[in-house]
Image (spheres, rainbow, N blue to C red):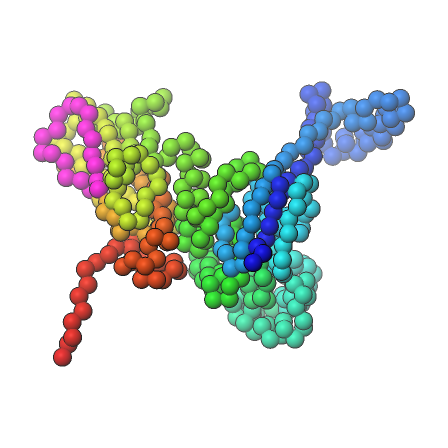
Amino acid sequence: MLPIISAEGLGKTYRISHLTRTESYRTFREELMRKPARLWQRAKNALHGGAVLAAETSEDIWALRDVSFSIDAGEVVGIIGRNGAGKTTLLKVLSRITEPSAGRVTVSGRVASLLEVGTGFHPELTGRENIFLNGAILGMTRADIRERFDEIVAFAEVEKFLDTPVKRYSSGMYVRLAFAVAAHLEPDILVVDEVLAVGDAQFQKKCLGKMREVSGREGRTVLFVSHQMGMITSLCSRGILLEGGQIAFDGGAAEAVAKYYTRSDGAPFAVDYTKLAKAVGDQFATLQQAWIEDANGQRTGEIDIRSGFEIRMRYRLHDKSPKSPAPQFHLYNAQGICAFATVGEPPTEMVEGVYESRCRIPGNFLNNDTYFVDVALAYYHAGVHVSFHERGALTLVIFDPIEETLNTRSRRGYSGPVGGIVRPQFNWETVRAS
């Protein structure tokens, strides 16, 4: 079976111009006054073989370079990377909005794209008219659009403004209607950029549910770009990580997210605070190191959902330290929701010196997601005194190797996403009642 999307050596370059050092920024009025003189100078330069753009230099920037991959029908693929990595450019090439500068891409089927607010909408037309316009662009007949019209309007929740020109819509209303049209008019490929971040949390949840339905029940292909890694790991089975316009990783979604974090800031699963110019802490205690360790004692930010791991931190207590402080870790998921906060029980007598506190998290407890770990140290005598609280100090990715866990007790053949911040395995008992 041929892939629904195939890219071979794909490249996209843009030419950008720079002012030379002798040029300065000018006002609009100054530019208008200089325009005739510059045109005359360019004409003279051209006649005498000189530089036509004497005051400017230009260079070619590769937004994409040598990108090759294939995507099968029904796959849900998350495309991630830092700003400027080439994610949106790739989607525009796949959506046939822009032509590649090198290589080739083959797309089989209808593509519905939602790349920015108002994509494919005419601002002067009403919401009703734009639904029919978008459907026509996707190759739908008027009868097909009418059949799905009520469902689109109900999903978008813009009934009151359906006959209002969309130029008067808020950005949130734009996105609601655009996504509803793109998702309901049965495209073979649904392409969604970070635009969903414009909507509120309830609408984002609604869109994610619709994308799962489109990919799972209806078997269509979804390409999804987001900086919210929790959405990537929960929705996508595959992830493509872009760096500098090239593919840095192509594999499981959780593994792609882990690569993204470990490449972004060096080693966010292990931080050495002693190398900072300013100490983290106060006159009582200072933080030295924090890291995550797997069951084999290796420092890592990628943990198999079935395996236990430890969060550790090392700190120094000074001679002024009153009594014993309480070490603690707070874990937040990618949506900023606190999974849990745990406080350690310190020894009753702690004198000046370096200490290490550890907290072991069992396997089959956290869900597959990205988590951020706060590390803190506080005193609870005569009120609360916090010596340090480093927010998001560590990054942790829990991944579920579904090809291995599909038929285990936790999944029992179910391959879809499992809800919840945590995913513990409790002891169950079922007996006959009579």
| Image-based side of 164 in relation to 350, left or right | right
Residue 210 can be seen, yes or no: no
Residue 7 in the image, given as x and y percentages of width and height:
60, 47
Q: Is residue 84 magenta?
A: no
**Magenta-drawn segment:** 343-360
Q: Is residue 405 above or below residue 184?
A: above
| Image-based side of 322 in relation to 329, left or right | left
Residue 189 can be seen, yes or no: yes
Residue 22 in the image, given as x and y percentages of width and height:
71, 20
Name the foreground residue: 320 vs 355.
355
Name the foreground residue: 219 vs 165.
219
Image quadrant where one finds the C terminus: bottom left
Specify the farthest residue to the top: 22
Residue 110 in the image, given as x and y percentages of width and height:
63, 61
Determine the image quadrant of residue 373: top left
Q: Is residue 180 above or below residue 288?
A: below
Q: Is residue 46 above or below residue 374?
A: above
| Image-based side of 310 in relation to 255, left or right | left
Residue at 37 percent across and 53 percent down: it is 402
